[in-house]
Image (tube, helix red, strand yellow):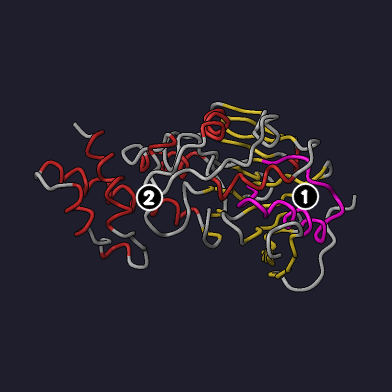
Amino acid sequence: MRRVMMLGAVVLAGVVSVAGLAGQQERTIEVEQLEDNLFVLRGGGGNSAAFVTDGGVVLVDTKLAGWGQPLIDKIGELTPNPVTTIINTHAHFDHVDGNVEFPASVDFVAHENTQRLIGENNPVRGLGRPARPSPFGDDGHGVPEITFSDRLTLGDGDDAVELHYFGRAHTGGDAWVVFPALGVMHAGDAFPGKNLPIMDSSNGGSGVDYPETLRKASEGVEVERIITGHSSVMAPADLAEYAEFVGAFVADAQAAKAAGTSAAAFAAGWEVPARFAGYGSAPPERLTPYVEDIYAATP
């Protein structure tokens, strides 16, 4: 079996040029090798993962528009195996828009809510800007056609990939992608890194449900490493702590509502608790919509 052709350091940087764009732009993809057949691909949006199997490459997330071909090129440097399956962790543009640049032979997979949300193309709650023009044409190419509700397994043996849904969090369709033979999980933006997440109610997300969803993911899957949506690879203990961090924010917001504090005032004054040193917050204008949603969902 010819799995991977890999030379040089564990972390590589490749520069690719995208033709056909106004004023050609360089698109840089950095590669972190986790195993001989698993790579994290950074740059151009959310973290992607390439899992090289006997039958082809399973790719998790495809970044922003214009980054599909750079992904194809970079994966081609890592293995002669073609991309055969793309899994989208959720519907946000920085994780799905590159789908359209992959060939029609690829199987596109996502949670059933993500399939619907990609079609709806709703703006992201809290970003303060309208939805971008959808790259998906009338033929629907790149929109996931294989979906699941709670759990789905693709492949078998060492090549198996498990998809889990634990409930609403970042969006209403967050898929947790597990490579069981390697003890690795891709969390998407449900666990973006050690900072307050986007709680996108416009796309089915829920601040109130978020902490419990994280706890279910932390307790429901046994892995050793977790690929985050936009940060470094972390450990299961980090995910468990992240559930407590998001839970602390939600609990503080609920207590502020009970005390009669406005959502804007709470967002302007909230500080990361000392026990979560190193975690980041967000500007009040970003937090306020999420606090409003938590208030609305709290009796």
- The answer to whether residue 111 is magenta is no
Residue 285 percent coordinates (x, y): 29, 55
Residue 297: quadrant of the picture: top left
Q: Is residue 293 left or right of residue 18?
A: left
Q: Nearer the viewer, residue 154 or 76?
A: 76
Report x, y in % for residue 79.
Answer: 83, 56
Q: Which residue is identified by label 1?
A: 52
**Whether residue 152 is situated above or below residue 208 in the rendered picture:** above
Query: Who comes first in sequence, dot 1 or dot 2?
Result: 1
Q: Position of residue 265 (x, y in %)?
A: 16, 53
Q: Is residue 159 visible?
A: yes
The residue at which mark 2 appears reads as 128
State whether residue 225 appears in this view. Answer: no
Q: Residue furthest right?
A: 1
Q: In this picture, which residue range is highlighted in magenta?
A: 61-86
Residue drawn at the location 69% of the way across and 35% of the way down: 108
